[in-house]
């Protein structure tokens, strides 16, 4: 799928026009948030070591989870495949019809999941899901399909229970796939669940069907993660001798990279965010890279400057600037995009969204520069992950595709360009042709199209056995 061109960031240089105290403070901020080429290389080298540890041993910071998705898509696969995506309030069923030659069609339906279903017996939820699938297949004329349609299921009950408010009874310790499959069988719905899907693996596959040279998939949005195709011989902890291919997709869970804080350039502002987060000391890399956190890092810098009387005069703290996560990453996007000489968009965000008024131009530039530093650091660290994956898998000598889903990659000004700039620094031998060597592409809907494609791969595996 082609990527609409994200807006370009209108960058400004280091702050030199403020007071002596402001300039000195911003010099320190520049140092804290800037990662030079040499340090990027050190982070990448540590990333590679952690990948190897995760492949060979359980319970490592980089979990490197075998996905059981073996082999690759060719783009020639055909047939009907289903995806089921259970979110916080909605259930989505997607029918993906693969037409070969990298082409596919999708049609989907959504249904609301009531509070009663979220908190009642798990059997009731599964019955409801089965009814929704049955109704959808009837609408598509597939209710009497001679062969059971393979389905990929984006659902991990413990995650949903803790993060989205599901608290069904009779589900703890039980396999959600078996519970739903039983409900489908009872209702004679011609569907076989063939895969429990991670959305990052789905992102890789949704890109690979159209671009068979795809070797990795990433999420760079609210959260962050990566998946890539690995040789089974290199997965030291793999204990299952029989496979249908010599390759398998690995779900890295790289948001947890360097939880030990050995190498990442974590600042006092990051530490403050971490302390006050719902998961202190975990997901260290994600907290430097992901859209959920970038705005809060910026807010921590701004409020620290306010504490020191370096920003907004003696203006009272507004309730909004004092509230955790109230400075949204979307504000950063608008601020970075602002090309006006008076930074009118920056002023409007501070005034309208944060109730900060009478801000002078130097202060507007300081806020813009902070956003630029935090956003650029995130993109450069994302580049480390991409180059680390490709270096480990020995894909730096030929052109490859990498599928990426997520709002940062799709919408944040110059995020992709900054990734490429950092990758060129990490790969000086192909710096001039970096965009031809590593083709980053938008791969939407890993939990929909990607889940259906995962079901396709799983079905192929079952048939080959």
Image: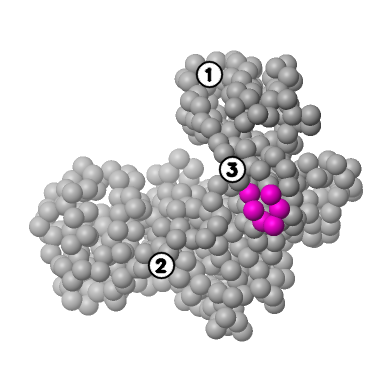
Colour scheme of the rendered structure: one colour
Tag in front: 3 or 1: 3
Q: Residue at x 50, y 24 (%)?
A: 113
Q: Residue at x 70, y 40 (%)?
A: 80
Q: Is residue 25 left or right of residue 206?
A: left
Q: Nearer the viewer, residue 314 or 428?
A: 428
Residue identified by numbered label 2: 414
Tag in front: 3 or 2: 3
- What label does residue 106 carry, if any? 3
Instruction: Mark 3: give few (<14), some (14-19) or many (20+) Cα within 10 Å.
Output: some
Q: Quadrant of the C terminus?
A: top right
**Can residue 133 be spotted in the picture?**
no
Q: Is residue 416 magenta?
A: no
Q: Label 1, secondary structure: give it.
A: helix
Q: Is residue 280 left or right of residue 346?
A: right
- What label does residue 117 carry, if any? 1
Magenta highlight: main SS: strand
- What label does residue 167 carry, if any? none
Q: Is residue 88 left or right of residue 179?
A: left
Q: Residue at x 69, y 75 (%)?
A: 398
- Report the magenta residues as a range: 99-104
**How far is mark 3 from mark 1, CA to CA?**
27 Å
Q: Earlier in the sequence, mark 2 or mark 1?
A: 1
Q: Is residue 230 left or right of residue 37?
A: right
Q: Earlier in the sequence, mark 3 or mark 1?
A: 3
């Amino acid at each position: 799928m082609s990527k609409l061109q994200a807006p370009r960031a209108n960058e400004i240089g280091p702050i030199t026009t403020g007071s002596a105290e402001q300039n000195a403070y911003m010099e320190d901020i520049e140092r804290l948030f800037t990662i030079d080429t040499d340090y990027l290389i050190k982070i990448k080298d540590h990333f590679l070591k952690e990948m190897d540890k995760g492949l060979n041993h359980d319970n490592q910071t980089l979990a490197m989870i075998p996905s059981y998705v073996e082999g690759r898509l060719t783009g020639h696969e055909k047939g009907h495949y289903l995806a089921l995506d259970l979110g916080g309030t909605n259930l989505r069923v997607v029918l993906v019809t693969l037409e070969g030659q990298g082409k596919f069609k999708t049609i989907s339906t959504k249904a609301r999941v009531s509070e009663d279903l979220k908190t009642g017996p798990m059997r009731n939820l599964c019955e409801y899901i089965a009814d929704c699938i049955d109704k959808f297949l009837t609408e598509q004329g597939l209710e009497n399909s001679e062969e059971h349609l393979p389905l990929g299921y984006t659902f991990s009950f413990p995650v949903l229970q803790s993060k989205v408010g599901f608290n069904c009874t009779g589900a703890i310790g039980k396999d959600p796939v078996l519970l739903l499959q039983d409900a489908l069988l009872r209702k004679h719905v011609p569907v076989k669940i063939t895969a429990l899907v991670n959305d990052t693996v789905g992102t890789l596959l949704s890109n690979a069907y159209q671009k068979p040279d795809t070797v990795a998939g990433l999420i760079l949005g609210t959260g962050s993660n990566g998946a890539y195709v690995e040789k089974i011989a290199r997965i030291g902890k793999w204990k299952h001798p029989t496979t249908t291919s010599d390759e398998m997709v690995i779900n890295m869970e790289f948001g947890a990279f360097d939880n030990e804080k050995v190498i990442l350039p974590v600042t006092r502002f990051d530490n403050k965010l971490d302390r006050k987060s719902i998961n202190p000391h975990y997901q260290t890399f994600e907290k430097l890279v992901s859209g959920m956190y970038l705005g809060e890092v910026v807010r921590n810098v701004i409020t620290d400057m306010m504490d020191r009387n370096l920003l907004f005069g003696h203006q009272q703290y507004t309730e909004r600037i004092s509230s955790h996560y109230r400075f949204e990453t979307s504000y950063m996007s608008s601020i970075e995009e602002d090309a006006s000489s008076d930074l009118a968009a920056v002023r409007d965000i501070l005034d309208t969204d944060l109730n900060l008024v009478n801000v002078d131009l130097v202060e507007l530039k300081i806020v813009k520069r902070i956003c630029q530093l935090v956003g650029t650091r995130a993109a450069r660290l994302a580049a480390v992950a991409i180059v680390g994956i490709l270096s480990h898998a020995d894909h730096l000598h030929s052109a490859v595709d990498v599928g990426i889903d997520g709002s940062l990659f799709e919408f944040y000004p110059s995020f992709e360009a900054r990734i490429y700039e950092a990758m060129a620094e990490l790969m000086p031998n192909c710096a001039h042709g970096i965009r031809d060597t590593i083709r980053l592409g938008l791969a939407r809907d890993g939990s929909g199209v990607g889940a259906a494609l995962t079901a396709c791969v799983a079905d192929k595996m079952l048939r080959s056995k």
